[in-house]
Amino acid sequence: MNNQKEKSQKKNSILVDGVILNGPVADSKSGEKFVEEVSKMIMEEVIKKASDATEKVCEWQSPEKLRTLLDLELKDTGENHPKLLQLCQDVIQFSVKTYHPRFFNQLYAGIDYYSLAARFIMEALNPSVYTYEISPVFLLVEEAVLKKMIEYIGWEGGDGIFNPGGSVSNMYAMNLARYKYFPDIKEKGLSGIPQLVLFTSEECHYSVKKAASFLGIGTQNVYFVKSDDRGKMIPEELEKQVQQARNEGSTPFFVSATAGTTVLGAFDPLNDIADICEKHNLWLSTSVAWNPHKMLMAGIQCCALLVKDSSDLLKRCYSANASYLFQQDKFYDISYDTGDKSIQCSRRADAFKFWMTWKALGTTGLEERVNRALALVRYLVDEIKKREGFQLLLEPEYANICFWYIPPSLRKMEKGHEFWEKLSCVAPIIKERMMKKGSMMLGYQPHRGKVNFFRQVIISPQVIHEDMDFLLDEIDSLGKDL
Amino acid sequence: MNNQKEKSQKKNSILVDGVILNGPVADSKSGEKFVEEVSKMIMEEVIKKASDATEKVCEWQSPEKLRTLLDLELKDTGENHPKLLQLCQDVIQFSVKTYHPRFFNQLYAGIDYYSLAARFIMEALNPSVYTYEISPVFLLVEEAVLKKMIEYIGWEGGDGIFNPGGSVSNMYAMNLARYKYFPDIKEKGLSGIPQLVLFTSEECHYSVKKAASFLGIGTQNVYFVKSDDRGKMIPEELEKQVQQARNEGSTPFFVSATAGTTVLGAFDPLNDIADICEKHNLWLSTSVAWNPHKMLMAGIQCCALLVKDSSDLLKRCYSANASYLFQQDKFYDISYDTGDKSIQCSRRADAFKFWMTWKALGTTGLEERVNRALALVRYLVDEIKKREGFQLLLEPEYANICFWYIPPSLRKMEKGHEFWEKLSCVAPIIKERMMKKGSMMLGYQPHRGKVNFFRQVIISPQVIHEDMDFLLDEIDSLGKDL
């Protein structure tokens, strides 16, 4: 068909404004071949190596060196296919293998084959989920996933939207809360509104501060509530601070609690906090930001904001009713055109990849993955306790295991200033060595007066308990001379 | 290697917390096979059909019907591969083919093989561009693309960031502007700040209003400046309104001008507006929101905000310095850890796909595509003028062609109230018919007192002038009985 089309145009070549119009300017056969070759490369170099722990996690190059290794510059003329394929090869080679069984560096890791297949479909179809007209399938899929997530949370009903990241979800929630209490804000803005203040724990994600700044509330008006030794918000402290803010003439409106903090993996006591919120009429249990791109492995980005409200709060808060997109005289039920609930116009169909994994594994299969990760946590914790030179910061509550490695030279030292100062340099050096070797990747950070420690996060179902043994052996081997 | 690994674990099976740990829970061989089969399906059902105009653009089903055709529900147990492959097939079948040569419905369309290949790579590698440690290649690629875009705009230097959508870019710009004039806002919020007001044309994108609401400025404080018959902002009106706002005690700080409005494709007179902004110290030529996912076909989402400022304004405005991500004692130059310039934490490597297309085509190739699209616009406009029953709203300035189709029954009618009322029903009916037939997709809308008209947008290099002929023939054939 394509060939017939191409032939017929050659005959009909015409000149308009100095441009010859004689068929598609893109050579589809050659383009298809390129995509085919890159797909093969992805299968061989990425997907088939994803489960192989003997591959390198990363091939470290300094920014200065990598810049010379890659041909980054964009030029006037294009490159041919062999050159482009070489570039693809280079990109894969020098990228960090986040899907590697020994990549433990972030709160996401591993490969989920179902999600990945769905992601390929989505990229090929290139949908934008604003109207049913353009995204019939993906809007229904989003609806089905949101419904199931809401059911899983335990609400009787609700609403939700997928959006680009947990940080943005937090913004949505904060903005919804202030809109609910002061609906005039949408039109009039914050002027004339009493000084809004919000609460989160010291251990909160940094996006809460970013959100307060972006929404015009200001980072000063984020009150950080003390948390206990395990990193959990102390409800009594919350109540005290709410009362204090009221006494100072501010208007508390929002509490952001965390289920799985970034560093320690702590869960704030949600029920106690919810009671305080109810008592003081603050927004909390009314929305949940949930990122399936983390432990549920949907791939970046996949984030939902779910709201308990069923009175179209999202739509009332966000809609702008653009007449060129959300026409009112369409021939189908326009309640399916959900795009106006979003702060975005074009919006990715991120729900789809999570839907595919959920379809493939079922709720049971997803639960099994989480339980397995937590069993591996338990295994690693036991190993850490057995081994000389390793010290847990605290018993983990979730998938984050925080620990120090104490090299032999420090093991007999008194735990005074010098000890901690020396220990603080250990993790960064081991991190440098592991990255240069490419054997694994693991995060470290200082945290609330504690010097640099490792944070191990177990997510991927490709991880086995032998990888836990390897992790400890490798840290010891990389750091025992320090 | 993988097999060896699998064998070795079977021997080492252990029980922890009731979970048997004996190797990866995911079956990688079967997962790889699934991805391979879906990839084949994508190649056959999507990519190879993308250039074939005889395929259907969409296979219309009502939401109610489609829900019964698709098995959407998420269950406790997972599905087997044949069932999952059938679901993938269904998703493709019932999705709108936005890559089809006769999809003219949105401001994006078509398929770019290079961008698509890059998107597949990106999904497989699953990077998040916050730190060089995790995304060495993609951070350097983003830097290279931003540098070239800035150069293309004509600035001597600058900064920028890729973010999820043009709407979000507009928010970034608005927030940067108010931060520049009132840096205290980041910490203190809007309270105590004079009433900020901003300006845009009547023809602006609806995201400007959404941004004002989200940032706490309020939609009432968006002043819509009159535009001329061609849809361009009238600079004298802007100046008048700025003056008036000042007189009323408000504080103008920001003008959002549009280069290619959504409906008419109008370009605001940037130079004149910039002069007014300079005179009144307002933010305008200081940032550009540019979406390569539209005419440059990078695929949704690919959007950059570029700023002229070289004094780290983005970083100062947005940074939160999370110590668990942006550690200060890393072993490489941490100025490459650019993630803190963003409102997001996890962030997609959207620059990469645009980089790949630019590499493949060169600047010349990209320019050629745009010129070709504009020549096709010229061709279509000439055809519309020649044909009875078609009427242009105005001479297009860009890739949007706005026109009415007047069916034979209305052609002799006086252009009074009845005529316009009847005409307003024509486009929606033709739209319904074309979607049910699946022959093409084209948008319509009412606009500033003009009843429903078609808006044709030419983007894809797969489009040929015969498709323009087809478009007019098809509209006539679908609507001549009306």
Image (tube, coloured by chain):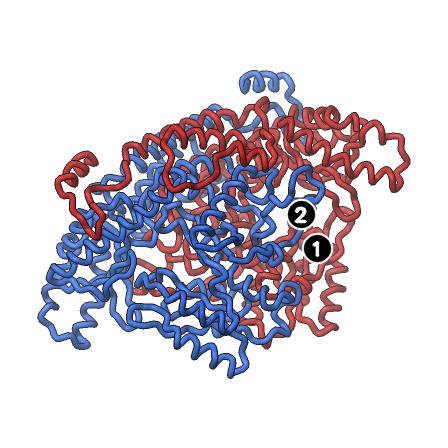
Chain colours: A blue, B red
Amino acid type indicated by mark 2: Thr
Residue at disc 1, secondary structure: strand
The quarter holding residue A1 reads: top right
* Marks 1 and 2 close (CB-CB < 8 Å): yes
Residue at mark 2: B261
B131 horizontally vs B418: left or right? left
Q: Residues within 10 Å of mark 2 (few under 14, many from 20)?
A: some
Amino acid type indicated by mark 1: Ser
A45 horizontally vs A409: left or right? right
The quarter holding residue A200 reads: bottom left
Question: For the point 53% across and 37% down, which residue is it?
Answer: A137
| Chain that bears disc 1 | B
Q: Are marks 1 and 2 on the same chain?
A: yes
B181 horizontally vs A389: left or right? right
Question: For the point 71% across and 74% down, which residue is it?
Answer: B249
What percent of the width, then of the height, locates residue A425?
Answer: 21, 66
What percent of the width, then of the height, locates residue A430?
Answer: 20, 58
Question: For the point 54% across and 73% down, which residue is it?
Answer: A196
Q: Residue furthest bottom?
A: A247
Work out whether B404 lies above or below A205.
above
Residue at mark 1: B201
What percent of the width, then of the height, locates residue B95?
Answer: 54, 33
The quarter holding residue A37 reads: top left
Question: For the point 48% across and 57% down, which residue is it?
Answer: A169
Q: Is residue B184 visible?
A: no
User: Earlier along the polypeptide chain: callout 1 or callout 2?
Assistant: 1
